[in-house]
Amino acid sequence: MNRMHDMNRIIGTHDLLLITLDTLRYDVAEELAESGQTPNLTGLLPGGRWERRHTPGSFTYAAHAAMLAGFLPTPASPGSHPRLFAGTFPGSETTASGTWTFDAADLPSGLATAGYHTVCVGGVGFFNKLTPLGRALPSLFAESHWEREFGVTDPEALPNQIDRVAEIVARLPAERRLFLLLNVASLHQPNWFYLDDAARSKEEARSKGDTRASHAAALRHVDAHIGRLFALMRRPCFVIVCSDHGTAYGEDGHTGHRFGHEVIWTVPYGEFVLP
């Protein structure tokens, strides 16, 4: 496990970027990292490796509600693991000297009080602002964005989102610190279209079904574009990149998520300061 950053030295001096790679499985992320297929991500991770953690929720809304209250994925090893951020809460056993505490119900509100401009660029449906539920998470931020071109059905969702981030960063006053949540939808189903037909069986091509292989192809696509996002961010910038939950592709008869299974609860996590 990596040594915890002292967030009291980070908050106020660094921009913050939280990237949630929605639905990314730990095993797929680790396999691609070990085989050198995600150089833009793993090139910035400490030791070039993802940290194995457990998600606070088995689907997007639950996991993000927890993370935006300061409960990021927890290291999978036993022990009491101090948190980077924590709302004031009597008796908290995971608030340590390096934890940045805030007197608010959610992290965006706490950071806004500390002078940050808070922005959400959503991907999956829980960020679409089309319904009261779809507005719940975006409403925590001073500024939020979602378009159909950012969602799960558009193969170019991430490049489209990064275009929007470029606009946001360009108009932000130099003296104003930024907290940006980018929810990446590419790993979420459907992801079959990221896998070349040549790599699929004729049956898969006809059914256009998602597989573990297309999940991996989606991650390679994300890695091919994520470098542009990092280049856009102002320095210094503290980055957290993680999955909110995994998903099943037939393991023990299960498909999808929102239930208890190892491939759902175990997620990749990394944090670093952009060089």
Image (spheres, grey):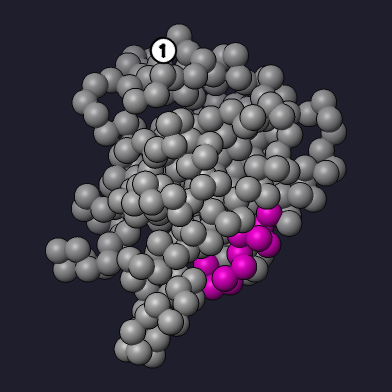
Mark 1, secondary structure of its residue: loop
Frontmost residue, 113 versus 213 = 213
Examine the image and state in which quarter residue 73 appears.
top left
State the extent of the magenta-drawn residues as a range: 152-162
**Picture coordinates of residue 36 (x, y %)?**
44, 50
In the rendered image, the vertical position of residue 173 relative to residue 160, given as above or below: above
Is residue 156 covered in magenta? yes
Which residue corresponds to the image point at 69% horizontal and 19% vertical from the top-left?
Answer: 13
In the rendered image, the vertical position of residue 187 relative to residue 109, given as above or below: below
Could you tell whether 8 is left or right of 58 in the image? right
Q: Is residue 57 visible?
A: no
Which residue corresponds to the image point at 61% horizontal and 64% vertical from the top-left?
Answer: 157
Is residue 220 covered in magenta? no
Could you tell whether 214 is left or right of 167 in the image? left
Q: Is residue 52 visible?
A: yes
Query: For the residue marked with disc 1, what is the amino acid?
Result: Ala
Quick one: label 1, few (<14), some, or many (20+) residues within 10 Å? some
Q: What residue would you read off at disc 1? A: 96
Could you tell whether 197 is left or right of 171 in the image? left
Quarter of the picture holding the N terminus: top left
Tell which residue pokes out farthest to the front in this image: 35
Frontmost residue, 187 versus 171 = 187
Which residue corresponds to the image point at 70% horizontal and 39% vertical from the top-left?
Answer: 233
Examine the image and state in which quarter residue 56 appears.
top left
**Picture coordinates of residue 27 (x, y %)?**
30, 51
**Picture coordinates of residue 200 (x, y %)?**
37, 80
**Picture coordinates of residue 138 (x, y %)?**
60, 49
Q: How many numbered circles does the render carry?
A: 1
Frontmost residue, 135 versus 227 = 227
